[in-house]
């Protein structure tokens, strides 16, 4: 069996969107009652001043299931360890996808770097909504469209939550990125002379906003 390639995934605005309950708009507060009955929405730290609500990006479960067949997956977040564990209990409770391969703000407070991974950087793909946090590894990066479900201060348009709709599952960003990753993996496996996965990632245009 051939050794898997590596996939590094951001959390916030890539796989999920998290907001403090106190920051919900009036038109979004209906979600507090729906959280107990929905599989894509969770309330954390209930009855605390820091209670927050997590919304899964559509297609997350399918994405993780399929990507796990092709890559050894890692989480890399600028959130702290407690927050990362709260999220992973929801999306990977049995540690099937990520195991203990989780890097958080405590280990990497300013920028993100592949130097913290036990992996050949030539065999790593990064999926993140933010380019600037990867100053030294842009060749590995696929920038995904930022997932924003809740209202963001200063915006004039209604949020997905306010409109009671969401990003498409079948044609949304995660589904498109998965197709791209499957193609990259196939091309890498077919090209026996290739040892650098980064050559299959288009440069400088790396944004998978299909």
Image (tube, helix red, strand yellow):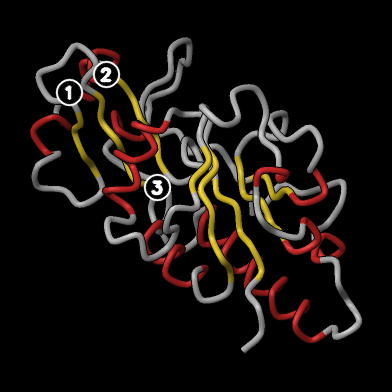
- Residue that badge 3 annotates: 57
- 13 in relation to 106, above or below: below
Q: Nearer the viewer, residue 188 or 97?
A: 97
Q: Position of residue 126 (x, y in %)?
A: 66, 51
Check if mark 2's residue and mark 1's residue have beta carbons within 8 Å.
yes
Report whether 189 appears left or right of 74: right
Cα separation between marks 2 and 1:
6 Å
Q: Nearer the viewer, residue 78 or 145?
A: 78
Quadrant for the N terminus in the image? bottom right
**What residue sits 87% from the left and 46% below the top?**
204
Q: Position of residue 91 (x, y in %)?
A: 32, 53
Cα separation between marks 3 and 1:
19 Å
Q: Residues within 10 Å of mark 2 (few under 14, many from 20)?
A: many
**What residue sits 64% from the left and 22% below the top?**
110
- Residue that badge 1 annotates: 29
Q: Secondary structure at mark 2?
A: loop
Residue 24 is marked as 2
**What residue sits 79% from the left and 86% below the top?**
190
Q: Earlier in the sequence, mark 3 or mark 1?
A: 1
Which corner quadrant of the image does residue 169 belong to?
A: bottom left
**What residue sits 29% from the left and 20% below the top?**
20
Q: Secondary structure at mark 3?
A: loop
Q: Earlier in the sequence, mark 3 or mark 2?
A: 2
Q: Earlier in the sequence, mark 2 or mark 1?
A: 2
Check if mark 3's residue and mark 1's residue have beta carbons within 8 Å.
no
């Amino acid at each position: 069996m051939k050794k898997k390639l590596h996939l590094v995934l951001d959390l916030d605005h890539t796989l999920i969107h998290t907001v403090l309950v106190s920051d919900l708009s009036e038109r979004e507060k209906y979600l507090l009652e729906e959280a107990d009955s929905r599989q894509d929405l969770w309330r954390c730290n209930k009855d605390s001043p820091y209670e927050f609500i997590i919304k899964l990006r559509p297609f997350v479960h399918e994405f993780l299931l399929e990507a796990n067949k092709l890559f050894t997956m890692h989480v890399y977040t600028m959130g702290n360890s407690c927050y990362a564990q709260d999220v992973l209990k929801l999306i990977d409770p049995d540690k099937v996808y990520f195991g203990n391969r989780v890097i958080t703000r405590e280990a990497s407070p300013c920028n993100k770097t592949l130097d913290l991974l036990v992996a050949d950087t030539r065999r790593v793909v990064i999926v993140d909504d933010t380019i600037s946090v990867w100053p030294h590894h842009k060749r590995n990066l696929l920038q995904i469209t930022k997932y924003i479900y809740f209202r963001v201060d200063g915006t004039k348009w209604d949020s997905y939550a306010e409109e009671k709709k969401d990003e498409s599952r079948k044609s949304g960003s995660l589904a498109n990125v998965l197709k791209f990753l499957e193609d990259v993996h196939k091309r890498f496996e077919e090209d026996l002379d290739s040892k650098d996965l980064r050559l299959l990632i288009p440069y400088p245009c790396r944004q998978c906003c299909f």
